[in-house]
């Protein structure tokens, strides 16, 4: 649906040259809710703005729905843009127009008959749950309501892609959650592919199925959300995961280990609510002793995601067998190194 | 001829004619300078770097030209434009003759004010318009102008008031108007009453314009 092929973006200002993107390769499949996470200045906004040509790539190609938008003439480009909705951190609604007129705008621009506009805007208002606000002005709405209007406006022309640039960053946690659920509903009901960027891992956890982590103009890690949450490879990804999943080894344990090197495993369960059956099976089957250092369950896309950190003691052979057993069960297990 | 009023050397007829002349000059020159200044102001906004019609050439020519015109005092413009005025209206003297320099004076002024008003419009809104696939023209009249309207109204209020003031100087080419009366009778002939009445009239006109402008602008913003 959206494909970045070795995309580079250089900003040339009088004083300096900024390499905002240094060769991005990324594929967003149809139906994905694809999240891009990164710290400020990583190049996230630049990346998303390339999709609807708010920025032009300096090098490489962005293919959207099979087309390279840079190769289109202005008329074709405008037609393609109607298939790509976008919502913004600061909503970007027209303060001089009513909620109704704001949502109607994309339709007015393409010359839709007013009767059709009325119907469509009515539908959209209902979908975002703000039918009663049709005659209000944006100033009279809360942030969450404004973003709903932004969403309704973005959906007006029945796009197949929705771009979200920090769409919830100006909202409080509760409102954020409500807006994210709305995005999820859009993805499910209309089968709209969503590309969103954020600096909050909790947003990714709540609705995304895939994630890319950006740092310094590069995608340093990407994969399914489960993969990245369970097995972050890079330090930055680990930091991001840590902001939502607490799986630290307790300090008290680390203090008491003395000179011996403990064997510690991190086990992730997806979908089941507890690791207990597994642990009891292991201690029955193998001559190992297990003690739980940390256990928690969080939700990723409403699926329970268990995080278990255990210390294993026993002779090496038995320990290795147990490890293999867990792996064979198709459960994600990895050894944790303790350094320092 | 008519009767004098309140001990002034001028008649009520003269006063009302002067009012009519002022209104006429302000209205006509406002219309024309608006027709010139508004598009120029828009051009100054959209051709600047990073805007929807970025164009170094247009911007870098327009910008200093407007500055130069703005820095010429009206009275000099009035004299300097005499040959041109004669060509356009057939005479360098009279109410119509004053309108030409008034337009030259007000148009760049309006362009600059319009520019300032439209620069206040949030760039995010233009971005949203671009994301929707709006044409340049659509961005101007569906996004820029409606969003800047409240501010534009204040701009035109300021321009109108500026024009009222300038018409007074246009008396130098026999343009007539309230300001001309104030100068000719009040100042040059020491007719204090005429001076007071005409100045009071000008003050009232300006006050009325300003409060109407403020009211309309606020009304739009409040919605
Ligand atoms: N128009 C521009 N001109 C020059 N440099 C720019 C421009 N836009 C972005 N940059 C630079 O490109 C880099 C990436 O910016 P970008 O806005 O994509 O980051 P971001 O990940 O979205 O950050 P944030 O979370 O703060 O929004 C930054 O160093 C920024 O200064
Ligand atoms: Mg950004």
Image: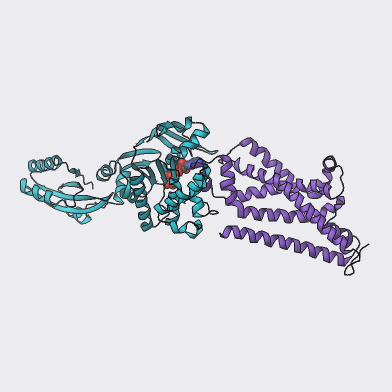
- Determine whether B3 is above or below A226 in the image: below
Relative horizontal placement of residue A329, taking residue A73 as reference (left or right)? left
- Determine whether A102 is above or below A83 in the image: below
Going 71% across and 60% down the picture, which residue do you hit?
B209
Place residue B23 in its image quadrant: bottom right
- Check the rendered structure and report the hue given to chain B: purple
- Determine whether A255 is above or below A325 in the image: below
- Extreme-right residue of the structure: B1
What colouring does the structure picture have?
Answer: by chain
- Extreme-front residue of the structure: A115
Residue A18 at what x, y percent from top left?
47, 38
Relative horizontal placement of residue A163, taking residue B197 as reference (left or right)? left
Residue A66 at what x, y percent from top left?
40, 31
Going 72% across and 63% down the picture, which residue do you hit?
B207
- Check the rendered structure and report the hue given to chain A: cyan
Q: Is residue A18 visible?
A: no
Going 38% across and 38% down the picture, which residue do you hit?
A218
């Amino acid at each position: 649906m959206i494909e970045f092929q070795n995309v580079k973006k250089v900003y040339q200002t009088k004083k300096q040259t900024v390499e905002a993107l240094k060769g991005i390769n990324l594929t967003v499949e149809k139906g994905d809710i694809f999240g891009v996470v990164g710290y400020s200045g990583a190049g996230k906004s630049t990346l998303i703005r390339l999709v609807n040509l708010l920025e032009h790539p300096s090098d490489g190609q962005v293919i959207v729905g099979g087309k390279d938008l840079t190769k289109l003439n202005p008329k074709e480009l405008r037609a393609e843009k109607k298939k790509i909705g976008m919502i913004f951190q600061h909503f970007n609604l027209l303060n001089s127009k009513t909620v109704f007129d704001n949502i109607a705008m994309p339709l007015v621009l393409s010359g839709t008959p007013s009767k059709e506009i009325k119907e469509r805007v009515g539908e959209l208002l209902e979908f975002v749950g703000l039918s009663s606000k049709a005659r209000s002005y944006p100033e009279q709405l809360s942030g969450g309501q404004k973003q709903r209007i932004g969403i309704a406006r973005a959906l007006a022309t029945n796009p197949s892609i929705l771009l979200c640039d920090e769409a919830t960053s100006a909202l409080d946690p509760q409102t954020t959650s409500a807006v994210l659920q709305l995005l999820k509903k859009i993805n499910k009901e209309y089968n709209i592919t969503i590309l969103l960027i954020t600096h909050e891992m909790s947003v990714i956890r709540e609705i995304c199925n895939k994630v890319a982590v950006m740092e310094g103009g590069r995608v340093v890690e990407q994969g399914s959300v489960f993969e990245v949450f369970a097995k972050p490879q890079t330090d930055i990804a680990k930091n991001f995961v840590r902001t939502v999943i607490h799986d630290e080894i307790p300090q008290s344990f680390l203090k008491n280990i003395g000179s011996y090197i403990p064997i510690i495993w991190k086990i992730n369960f997806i979908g089941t609510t507890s690791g207990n059956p597994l642990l009891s099976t292991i201690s029955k089957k193998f001559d190992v002793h297990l003690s739980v250092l940390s256990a928690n369950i969080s939700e990723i896309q409403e699926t329970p995601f268990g995080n278990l950190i255990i210390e294993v003691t026993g002779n090496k052979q038995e320990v290795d067998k147990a490890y293999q057993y867990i792996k064979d069960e198709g459960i994600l297990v990895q050894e944790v190194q303790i350094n320092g | 001829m008519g009767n004098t009023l309140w001990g002034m050397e001028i008649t009520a007829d003269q006063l009302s004619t002067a009012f009519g002349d002022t209104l006429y000059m302000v209205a006509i020159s406002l219309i024309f300078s608006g027709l010139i200044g508004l598009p120029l102001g828009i051009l100054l906004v959209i051709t600047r770097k990073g805007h929807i019609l970025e164009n170094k050439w247009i911007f870098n020519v327009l910008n200093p030209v407007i500055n130069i015109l703005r820095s010429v005092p009206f009275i000099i413009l009035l004299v300097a434009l005499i040959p041109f005025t004669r060509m356009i209206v057939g005479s360098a003297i009279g109410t119509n003759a004053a309108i030409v320099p008034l337009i030259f004076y007000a148009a760049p002024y309006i362009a600059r004010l319009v520019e300032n008003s439209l620069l206040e419009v949030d760039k995010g809104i233009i971005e949203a318009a671009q994301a929707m696939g709006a044409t340049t023209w659509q961005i101007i009249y569906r996004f820029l102008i409606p969003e800047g309207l409240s501010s534009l109204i204040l701009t035109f209020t300021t321009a109108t008031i500026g024009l009222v003031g300038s018409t007074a100087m246009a008396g130098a080419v026999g343009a007539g108007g309230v300001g001309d009366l104030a100068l000719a009778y009040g100042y040059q002939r020491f007719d204090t009453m005429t001076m007071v009445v005409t100045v009071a009239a000008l003050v009232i006109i300006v006050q009325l314009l300003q409060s109407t402008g403020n009211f309309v602008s606020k009304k739009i913003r409040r919605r």
